[in-house]
Image (spheres, grey):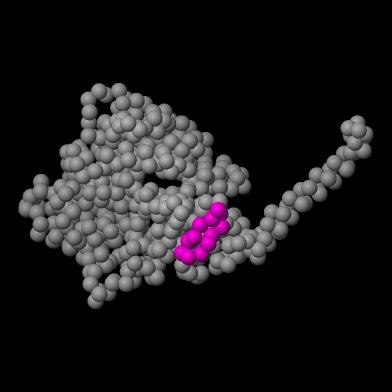
Amino acid sequence: MISLLSERLTWPLVAALALFAGGLTASYFLFLKPVYNIFFHPLKIYPGPKLWAASELPWGFAWMSGKLHLRLMELHDKYGAVVRVGPNELSYGVPEAWEDIFGRYKPGVRQENPKPSWYCSPDHHDIVGAALGDHGRMRRLLHQGFTNSAMLEQEPLIRGHVDLFIQRLHERSDDGKAVIDMFQWFVYCTFDIIGDLSFGEPFGCLRESAMHPWITWVFANIHLTHVFLLCKRNPFFYIFMPVMATVELFKEYEEHQKTLKAVCDKRMALETGRPDFMQVMMSKKGSLYLTPEEIYSNATLLTMGGSETTSNTLSGLAYILAINSVVKKKITDELRATFTREDEINMRSTAKLPYLVAVIEELMRYFPPGPNSMPRITPPEGNSILGKWVPGNTVLGIPHRVMYRSERNFKRANEFIPERWLNEGEDSEFASDRRDGFHPFSYGPRECLAQNLAYAEMRFILSRLVWNFDIEIDEQSREWIDHQRAYLIWEKPALFVHLKAKEKV
């Protein structure tokens, strides 16, 4: 039978059959599937561009370009608060969506919307990608490193690095004549702090006034992750891999993993306790513990979460102060009215500076650390979102920039106005602002554990900077905050400023 079949399958026939199969496949992906997605898919009831509903390619190309946040803003401005941005994806710009998408699992009421598999790390060893049970175990353990008492113990370590940060800036300011890249110096400071808190020793950036190679690898790893997420979501984009991710990036990633393991092993070998995150991760309390693999993975996560987000926001704050003399004067006046000596400034005392706190909040609204969404996906049986039943396996997102820069949620949304966080009365111009939609550290049971530390660190560093220096923008960075691309995080250029030392009080 087989021999008879092989005799009849001549090469011309095989070629014709292959061509026919290829034609059917092409017809399916280029015509039948897009037609179904546009006209017959359960999400057809949601508004959005037909091209994005037909295929994932428009979303993927926007992601790959680093301009997805801009495209999503345009789509929400055109189509409204809820937009279909893919064959199987909805984007929300409504404050109430936070609870329905990211809210706590309630048996019999609400199922958890987990993260899509393509958005999680392959091994799920860190708290971000962990399943519900493992996430609870990790969170209860890691939380011990971010309590108020833990922050009090950590403050002397943080103060030492901030002291050196200010010292280095004094050495280089040249009475305002020198051009200083503040983004670089914020990276030095925040990575030295997180290195000390995570691994028992700083990276030495402030000591050497230079970027540690490991930090370069960390930023390369972010770009590589950005590429891999896209390819995991849609394998079509693997054809662009040689353009998006070079061989050097893969080599840097391997070095990153080796270095991470080495520094973790070195810290874990220390027998003396230190008030740092590694001490918490190494502790065991009954069922609360982390495996070595979970320690390595969460150490990477803490390094990024405890440094990049903070340096991003501090850079944005420095930029605003350098171009906005009104905001700069108000912060300066508040500091001078509250403190008589620099050593009175600390992580707790700066919490009592309402205008400074408002400026930080407004910066995170105006220039959020991550402008896009951290997606969720409905469970197989579906879920109710804003009173509508959304089919199973639908990707859900709340893009931060869309939520915070929409006139539906914030009045004069594209203006930097710290006062919106101070005037809470009914007569306030900003009384209608939807503050319940503002969650820069995410929302629900998976919101960022380190947000209190991040706020305290930013208040402290910014206060010390303003106390010591008058900051002015260098013209080459006049439009620094505009036109930045986002690859998971902002791709920030150098922030060139001039620092003129203030007279000692």
Query: In the displayed structure, would residue 49 be above or below residue 195?
Result: below
The answer to whether residue 389 is magenta is yes
Q: Please identify the quarter of the rendering in which residue 125 is found.
A: top left
Q: Can residue 469 be seen here? A: no
Q: Residue furthest front?
A: 108
Q: Please identify the quarter of the rendering in which residue 50 is found.
A: bottom right
Side (left or right) of 215 relative to 147: right
Side (left or right) of 359 relative to 44: left
Image location (x, y in percent) of residue 64: 52, 51
Relative depth, front residue between 236 and 289: 289
Q: Residue furthest bottom?
A: 427
Q: Which residue occupies 27% across, 74% down?
A: 429
Image location (x, y in percent) of residue 393: 55, 52
The magenta span reads 381-394
Q: Which residue occupies 77% across, 52% down?
A: 24
Q: Which residue occupies 27% across, 31% down?
A: 279
Query: In the displayed structure, would residue 81 be above or below residue 213?
Result: below
Query: In the displayed structure, would residue 191 be above or below residue 61?
Result: above
Image location (x, y in percent) of residue 384: 49, 60
In the rendered image, the quadrant that contains the N terminus is top right
Q: Please tell me how many numbered marks the rendered image carries.
A: 0
Q: Can residue 121 be seen here? A: yes
Side (left or right) of 201 relative to 403: left
Image location (x, y in percent) of residue 197: 26, 36
